Image: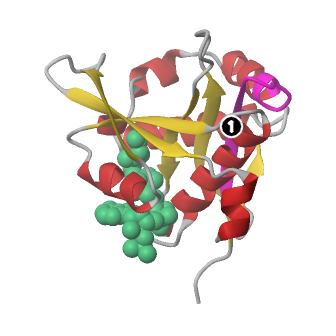
Amino acid sequence: MSPSLTVRRIAADQGAVFRELRTASLREAPYAFGATLEDALSADAASFDATAADHAVSFIITTFILYTEGHPAGLIEAHFDDTAARRAFVCELWVAPAVRHLRGGELLVDSAAAWLSNEGATEIYAWVADANRNAMRFYEALGFGPTGEHRRVTRAPDQAESLLVRHVPTTSQVFQQ
Ligand SMILES: CC(C)(COP(=O)(O)OP(=O)(O)OC[C@H]1O[C@@H](n2cnc3c(N)ncnc32)[C@H](O)[C@@H]1OP(=O)(O)O)[C@@H](O)C(=O)NCCC(=O)NCCS
């Protein structure tokens, strides 16, 4: 039987869970993220507590956590950038290998996108490393397409990443479906 997967916004007291998931993601999939495992391991516990407390209440940035049978098993960040356009992004997406291909990633992206759209986003953006073919296919399967915008990966300047976008359906588009 498939484990049941649920997603909830991070709570203010979940700094330790957040640290555990971030370090697990950076250890397991270092190719997928801008930060390194060393960055996360060298940060003190208080900084994760502060991030969890902020992400639990902020209108600009948050984190959603995936649970399998009540155990933390993945995460995603959602935020608005500080440009005039106030673009909405999902990032730092990771699902534990034991529960991949069970739609946990989709549940995380949809939860983050719903929060962003509730805060006013009409388009949801995601930077994906060109070499990360799995993530590229995952985002495409969820309706994200290319914007044509590219940049160098900060952690590995010889590599490129591409900006993908998914349009949030308007209320009238939802009713037409
Ligand atoms: C990318 C990732 C989050 C996907 O999580 P997941 O829970 O396995 O994905 P889902 O089960 O929700 O997949 C939804 C759809 O995406 C597509 N998809 C998911 N993983 C895929 C893969 N490895 N290759 C091709 N398509 C894939 C499929 O179409 C899938 O639907 P299907 O299972 O009915 O075929 C997960 O593989 C992961 O954590 N990877 C390492 C970290 C990473 O790359 N993060 C993204 C940074 S940009």
Q: Is residue 6 magenta?
A: no
**Which residue is located at x 81 percent, y 24 percent?**
58
Q: Residue 53, image x and y in percent?
A: 82, 25
Q: Quadrant of residue 31?
A: top left
Nearer to us in this view, 92 or 106: 106
Q: Secondary structure at mark 1?
A: strand
**Which residue is located at x 68 percent, y 24 percent?**
48
- Is any atom of residue 100 visible in this view? no
Q: Residue 17, image x and y in percent?
A: 69, 41
Residue furthest to the bottom: 1
Residue with the mark numbered 1 = 63
Q: Residue 12, image x and y in percent?
A: 85, 32
Height in image: 111 above or below 150?
below
**Which residue is located at x 23 percent, y 38 percent?**
130
Quadrant hosting ligand 1: bottom left
Q: Is residue 61 magenta?
A: yes
